[in-house]
Image (cartoon, helix red, strand yellow):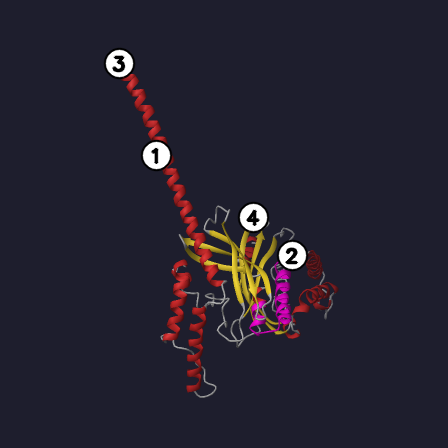
């Protein structure tokens, strides 16, 4: 009887242990879920806070501080001989007030290394610039901010955002714009990278109200840059492939049977067909002096296969999206435009990688590029070269 009771007691103890283990496991899982949800909420809150600060115009405190800075700059200008360069001291009370406003507005939501670049890159209050001027009286209201964590398991810290902006221009006319971008939350509630990729024509409206450049010219300039980027980073271009194959075939013929003295490849039908394609693709968007250097400076079709010698094995693809073109805020260089775009690169094996390209263009005339510089291709060209080895 004793052994039987002992056995029953052991079974009851085992069952009780199982219930306790299950209870604490459930409780632990619930706590973990709460931590994940809390972190995600803080991350979304940080992105929303930044968007609300950026896209709510006017900001009265910002305007008062900027007026003080302008007044100080006028005082400095009047005290110096005409033609001398000058700037406001970073230790002046006016500038320190501005830094304090940026710190209070953005500091709580950015990593230190990201925050340190907000002023130098004009990212802080980027939609507020020159709103302190009497003739600039546009308004912006942001609503329907949607922040979603990336579904990609390899980038769980990426958050995409979309927001609706109601823009009222100086004359009281209202337009709607959809803003899109991405933020990387390096730590809980702290942004390590923040990028608005598409403003849906908002910058053109602001530029028009600030009197920087006629809207029609602004649109032509942005259209020219977008057209060049789309031509350069949409691969393959079948017409280009056929022409390059014909040039490659011609070069093989020349190697096997050297032509007569005086033969010039540039005079051949194959090469002339290439020049005609470049002219058709890039010509409408470049000044003559800039267009004349596209081939010699290896700018035209630089990222298309066949550029470094045609190879039938090359079958990579590129797609471009989220092209963002913004006019320089520097009043001394109104013809300068910065651009950012996203490239989806699929290699010969079908592996997809994402690359962000950055650069600048100077529009010497409406819709005509005088200078075009791709300053950063996000490692794209190196990746192409390595995979072709």
Counting other residues with Cα less than 10 Å from the Cα at mark 4, is it few (<14), some (14-19), or many (20 or more)? few
Foreground label between 2 and 1? 1
Q: Is residue 144 left or right of residue 242?
A: left
Residue at the farthest front position: 172
Question: In terms of depth relative to the viewer, which is nearer, 55 or 86?
Answer: 55
Q: From the image, which quarter does the C terminus lie in?
A: bottom right
Label disc, if present, on residue 351 of the rendered structure: 4
Stretch of the chain drawn in magenta: 205-234
Disc 2 target residue: 310
Q: Is residue 377 visible?
A: no
What percent of the width, then of the height, locates residue 317? 61, 53
- According to the picture, the residue beneath numbered tag 1 turns out to be 24
Mark 3 lies on residue: 3
- Mark closer to the chain start, 4 or 2: 2
Question: Within the image, what quadrant is residue 87 found in?
Answer: bottom left
Which one is earlier in the sequence, the residue at label 2 or at label 1?
A: 1
SS assignment at label 2:
loop
Q: Residues within 10 Å of mark 2 (few under 14, many from 20)?
A: some
| Chain-order first, disc 4 or disc 1 | 1
């Amino acid at each position: 009887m004793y052994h039987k009771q002992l056995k029953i007691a052991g079974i009851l103890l085992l069952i009780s242990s199982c219930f306790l283990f299950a209870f604490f496991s459930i409780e632990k899982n619930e706590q973990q879920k709460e931590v994940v949800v809390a972190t995600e909420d803080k991350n979304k809150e940080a992105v929303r806070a930044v968007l609300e600060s950026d896209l709510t115009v006017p900001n009265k405190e910002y305007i008062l501080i900027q007026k003080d800075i302008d007044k100080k700059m006028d005082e400095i200008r009047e005290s110096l001989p005409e033609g001398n360069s000058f700037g406001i001291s970073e230790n002046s009370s006016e500038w320190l007030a501005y830094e304090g406003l940026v710190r209070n507005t953005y500091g709580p939501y950015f990593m230190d290394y990201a925050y340190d670049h907000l002023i130098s890159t004009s990212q802080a209050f980027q939609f507020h610039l020159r709103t302190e001027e009497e003739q600039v009286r546009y308004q912006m209201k942001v609503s329907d901010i949607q922040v979603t964590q990336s579904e990609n398991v390899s980038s769980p810290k990426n958050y995409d955002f979309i927001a609706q902006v109601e823009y009222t221009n100086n004359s009281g006319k209202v337009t709607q714009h959809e803003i899109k971008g991405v933020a990387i939350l390096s730590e809980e509630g702290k942004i390590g990278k923040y990028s608005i990729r598409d403003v849906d024509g908002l910058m053109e409206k602001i530029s028009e109200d600030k009197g920087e450049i006629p809207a029609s010219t602004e649109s032509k300039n942005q259209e020219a840059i977008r057209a060049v980027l789309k031509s350069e980073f949409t691969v393959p271009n079948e017409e280009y492939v056929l022409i390059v194959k014909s040039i490659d075939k011609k070069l093989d013929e020349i190697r096997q049977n050297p032509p007569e003295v005086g033969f010039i490849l540039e005079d051949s039908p194959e090469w002339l067909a290439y020049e005609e394609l470049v002219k058709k693709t890039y010509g409408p968007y470049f000044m003559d002096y800039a267009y004349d250097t596209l081939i010699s400076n290896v700018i035209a079709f630089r990222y298309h296969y066949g550029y470094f010698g045609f190879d039938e094995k090359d079958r990579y693809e590129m797609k471009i999206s989220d092209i963002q073109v913004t006019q320089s805020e520097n009043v001394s260089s109104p013809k300068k435009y910065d651009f950012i775009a996203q490239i989806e690169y699929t290699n010969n094996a079908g592996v997809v990688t994402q690359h962000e390209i950055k650069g600048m263009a100077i529009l010497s005339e409406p819709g005509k590029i005088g200078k075009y510089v791709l300053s950063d291709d996000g490692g794209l060209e190196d990746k192409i070269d390595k995979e072709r080895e």
